[in-house]
Amino acid sequence: MMSVWFITFHGGGYPCKTPASPAQSYTGSINTLAGLILSGPLPQMQELRGSAIDASGNLYLANAYKNLSQILQFQPAGSGTYVSSTSNPWAGSGLEHPFDLAFDSGGNLYASNQDMASKATSLAVTWYDSKGNYKGVFVPNPQATPPGPGLLQLRGIAWDGNNTWYVADEEGDSNGQGAKGTGAVYMYQNNGNYIGAVAVTDPIHLLYYQGYLFIGSGSGNMIYCYNTSSGGAVTGLLQKISPGITINEVSGMAIPGDGYLYFGNRLNLQVLRFPLQMSSPPQATGGEVFFDQLPDFPEFIRLLDV
């Protein structure tokens, strides 16, 4: 078994190939949806976004192009590839330009939607059981007590493995009144009840790790940390950035457990990595280019075992 980096790109056309002569700053093993991991027959794919892995090792992808708006399932083949499920699209009901995916501990899959469904009054996180059956709107669910604010620019979602969901709204208001603001991450119990919010400038990507919520700020060019136990304000994670490193819109993040934080440096067509110190609060210092000269804007990254 080997580990490879799986990257989804802005355009998401298939295949998306790496440059013919990768720059010397490439390290590790990269797969950019060129058919080396995914095998078919393959469904139409465009604007691929977030992914998630279930307890059986199946890979799920948000097929985000508006006219598709699907969740696709790929099953590990045991030969270094993931095979397209015969049931693809795995889910489609309730999806409107999906962005991010995440599982809860019960095997239910949740999707954040960037566009509003017909007759809806807010953007929504929808959810699906382990068979891909649409279960409805998770947040903001009008039957929840309280349901929480309406969502304006819904992006990343994250689950803490216990009882709390985190939802990023680029134009959210930390007062929780649904007014347009400069960004907030909203918090919900697993039953959909609204808990509260934390102010973050332009939050897009979320990652939960060891009691902290890592929040990628697009225009803020920063990753923030939120202590999910003690609460309070967020703190900046990236410190003493190495000379020559310029962060130009943070995108998807990954912490594979090798002592590094990896994230997309979106507009620079890079993936960066920083040594990660899980202190209180966490800090990531220095940094280096891990992948360079990518063929399109990197949106989400994930290290897969194949």
Image (tube, rainbow, N blue to C red):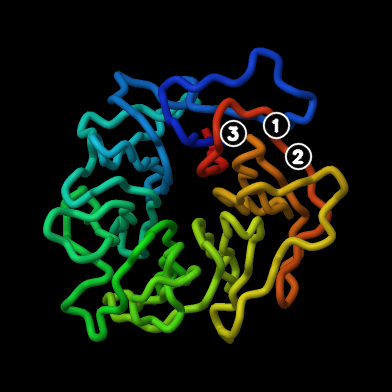
Q: Mark 3: which amino acid? A: Val
Q: Residue at x 41, y 48 (%)?
A: 52
Residue bearing the label numbered 2 = 289
| Extreme-right residue of the structure | 243
Give the image location of residue 261, x and y in percent: 68, 53
Local secondary structure at mark 2? strand
Mark 3 crowd level (few <14, some 14–19, many ≥20, 10 Å Cα):
some
Inspect this view and state whether residue 55 appears: no
Tell me, yes or no, whether the two marked residues, 2 and 3, touch with CB atoms within 8 Å.
no
Question: Compared with residue 42, is residue 131 higher up or lower down, i.e. above or below?
Answer: below
Residue bearing the label numbered 3 = 4
Q: Mark 1: which amino acid? A: Asp
Question: Compared with residue 217, is residue 163 higher up or lower down, i.e. above or below?
Answer: below
Mark 1 crowd level (few <14, some 14–19, many ≥20, 10 Å Cα):
some
**Quadrant occupied by the N terminus:** top right
Q: Residue at x 37, y 58 (%)?
A: 103
* Tag in front: 1 or 3: 1
Local secondary structure at mark 3? strand
Residue bearing the label numbered 1 = 292
Real-space Cα separation, disc 1 to disc 3, in angstroms: 16 Å
Question: Compared with residue 152, is residue 5 higher up or lower down, i.e. above or below?
Answer: above
Label placed on residue 148: none
Give the image location of residue 260, x and y in percent: 72, 52
Tell me, yes or no, whether the two marked residues, 1 and 2, touch with CB atoms within 8 Å.
yes
Give the image location of residue 59, x and y in percent: 39, 41
Q: Mark 3 or mark 1, which is nearer the start of the sequence?
A: 3
Real-space Cα separation, disc 2 to disc 3, in angstroms: 17 Å
Real-space Cα separation, disc 1 to disc 2, in angstroms: 7 Å
In the foreground, 74 or 220: 220
Give the image location of residue 145, x and y in percent: 23, 85
Q: Residue at x 44, y 58 (%)?
A: 156
